[in-house]
Image (cartoon, grey):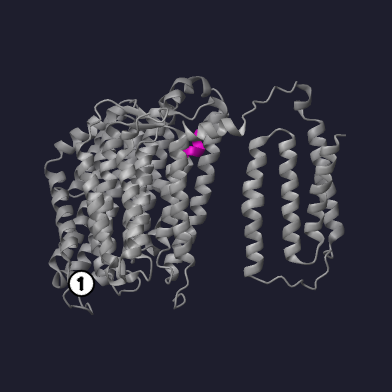
Amino acid sequence: MNLSLSILEFAVIGAGLAILLADLWTPVPQKRNLGYAAAAAVGLIFLASMLMQAAAPAYAFEKMYVLDGLALFFKRFFLFAAVIVLVMSVEFADRIEAGIAEYYALIMFALAGMMFAASANDFILVFVSLELITVTFYVLTSFQRGRLHSLEAGVKYLILGALASAFLVYGIALVFGVANTTNFGELMGSARVASARPVFLLGLLLVLVGLGFKIAAFPFQIWAPDVYQGSPAPTTAFLAVGSKAAGFILLLRVLFSAVPEITVNWTKLLMVIAGMTILYGNLCAIPQRNLKRLLGYSSIAHAGYMLLGVAAMNSAGSSAILYYLGAYLFTVLAAFTVICVVMRGVEGDDISAVAGLHQRSPLLAASLSLAMVSLAGIPPLAGFFGKFLLLKAVVEKGATQPGCYWLIAVAILGVVISLYYYLGVVRAIYWSKGSAELSDIKVSWPIQVSLYACIAAMFYLGLFPDRLVNIAMEAVKALKL
Amino acid sequence: MDPVFAFLALLTTAGAVAAVSLRNLVHCALCLVVAFAGLAALYLQLNAQFIGFAQILVYVGAVAILIVFAILLTRGSEPGNQPILSSSWQAGLGVAVLVLGALGVAVASSFVRYYPVSPAPQPTVRELGEQLMTNYVLPLEVIGLLLTAAMIGAVIIAMHEKQGPR
C-alpha cells in the first residue's frame, strides 16, 4: 500500500475542508474572497503535481488505484480547470444568495472525485468516484435556488443522473457476476473467457451507457442543454470541462485497459455513436439563442468529435483525445468566464446580451470571439489542430475499416454546420446594431489573468502543438492499444 | 417448526398488519419499526449477519426515523377520517392472491429445486469489516466525502431564505 501516490487528492480534500472551516471565522463581506484562497490552494497543488513523475505505473490499495502517465495528465488537467472555475465563481459570488464558501468547497470535492476517477483501476473506485462527482454536481447545478431555471436543471440532472448510475452499477454487477473480479488488471486476463457469455457483454454495454451519460454522447445527451442552461455559469463550465473529461478518462480505461479484447469488436457501434453525436449536437445548436444552451449543444458535438478518437482504436486516436481535451479546456473556460462576467443582471443569457461587446470591453470581446473560432476549428487556434489530429487518426483506421471514410465525411459536415452558429456569436459581438447597453464593463484582475492565460494557451497550442502532442503520446502508453 | 422462527414470524406479521390497519399515523410508523426489527432478527437467525445488521441500520435506524420525521413535519399526527379499508379491497385481495399463486408456481417449477444447494459462502460481518478497512478503504473514504458533500448540499438547498422563487 502506497499512500503517497494519492497525496494530490488528499491535499485537495484537505483544502476543501479548510475552506469550509475558514468560513466559520470569516466575516460575511469577506466570504467571497475565500474563493481566491481556494484557487491559490488548488494552484499550488497544480504546481506540486508538475513535480510528480510517473514513468512506470505505480499501484496502491490492492491495485485499485493506479498512478501512471495518463492519470497524471488528467489530474493536472482537472486541477488547472478548477483554478479557473474558482476564480470565475468569485466573480459569480454576488449572484448566489447564501453559502458561497460551500460552493467553493463543493467544487473542490468534485475536483477530488475527478482526480480519483483519473486513477481508477477498479470498477468499485470508478463507481464511487463518479458518484462523488455527480452528487456534488446535483448541488452545484441547483445552487441558485431562488431561480426556477437553476432548480429545474438540478432536478433534471438528479433524475437522469440517478438513472445513469443505476445502469452503471447494474452493469458492474453483471460484469462482476461473470468475471468474479472488478479489477481492470484481472479483468483483462479473464475477459477473453468471459466474453463468450452474453451477460458479460450486456454488463459492459450497461457500463458504457453510464459513461455515455457523463460525456453526453448520443443517445444519452438529452440532459445536457437544459442543465447547461439553468446552472450557474461556473458550474456549467466545470460540468463541460471536468465532468466530461472524467467520463472520457474512464471510457478510455474501461475500453482499452480492462477489456481491450472485446472493444475491438465494438468499432462499428462506437463509430455510429460518434457520428450521431456530432450530427445531433451541431444540428440542434443552429436555432439556439441562449448562449449557455448553445454551448451545451456544442459540448455534445465536441463529445462526438472526441469519440472519433475512441472509435479509431489506435494510440494516435487516444492521444488526439487528450490533445483535444487540452485545447477544449482553455477554449471553454475562456467562453464561460466571459459569459459569467457579461451576463451579470441579464435574464435569459440571450446572445443579444453580447451585442456590441467590443465597445464595452475589448478584452472580453476578443476572448469570446477567439473561443468561438477555436471551437469551430479554424487555424491557427488550438481547436483546429485537435480536430486535425482526430481526423488523422480515423484516416489511419480507414485502411482496415472502409466505413471510417463515411465517419470523416460526417465529421467534416459537422464542422461546416458549426461554423454557422459559432460565427453567429462573433457577428453579434462585432457587427450587431442597436444594442441597448453600451456602458463599460469592469473586469477584475484575476479574471483578466485567467482570460489572458486561456488566450495565450489557445494560440500556443495551435501554433506549437508538438509539445502537448508528445506529452499525450507518452500518456496513452498506459493503455493497451 | 422452530419456536424462535415461529415467534419472530408472528411478530413481523403482526407488526406489518398493525402498520397498515392502525388509525394514528405515528402508531403505524412505530409498528413498521417492529416489522423491520422482526425481519432483521429473522435474517440473523438464518445466520445472514450482514443483511441483518444492514436491515437494522438502514431500515430501523434511518428509514423509520425518516418516516416519523416526515409525518411530524407535514400533516401532523391527527388521524384522518377515511375508512381503513379502501372501497376496492376485494380487487386488491384478488391481485394479491394472483401474485402469490404466480410466485408459488414459479418457485415450485423452478430448476433450482433439482440442484443440490451449494454451500453458500459465509462472509461474516467481521470479514466484511476487515475488507472495508484494508483493501476497500479508499472507496470507503470517498463515500465518506460523498456523504459530506451530499449533506452540505441538502442543507444549502433546504435552507430558509427570504424571497421565494422568481
Residue that mark 1 sits on = A432
Left or right side of A387 for A113: right
Chain of the residue displaying label 1:
A
Residue A116 is drawn in which quadrant? Answer: top left
Label 1: element kind: loop
Left or right side of A96 for A475: left
Residue at image coords 36%, 45%? A114
Instruction: Work out whether residue A217 can be spotted.
Output: no
Residue at image coords 22%, 78%? A437
Range of residues picked out in magenta: A204-208
Q: Report how many numbered discs are placed on residues in the image.
A: 1
Q: Dot 1: within a 10 Å radius of its alpha carbon, few (fewer than 14), some, or many (20 or more) residues? A: some
Task: Choose between B74 and A453: the one closer to the eye.
Answer: B74
Residue B23 is drawn in which quadrant? Answer: bottom right
Amino acid type for the residue under numbered disc 1: Ser
Residue at image coords 82%, 32%? B108
- Quadrant where the C terminus of chain B lies? bottom left
Does the magenta portion include A205?
yes
Q: Main secondary structure of the magenta part?
A: helix
Residue A210 location in percent, x, y? 47, 43
Residue A206 location in percent, x, y? 51, 39
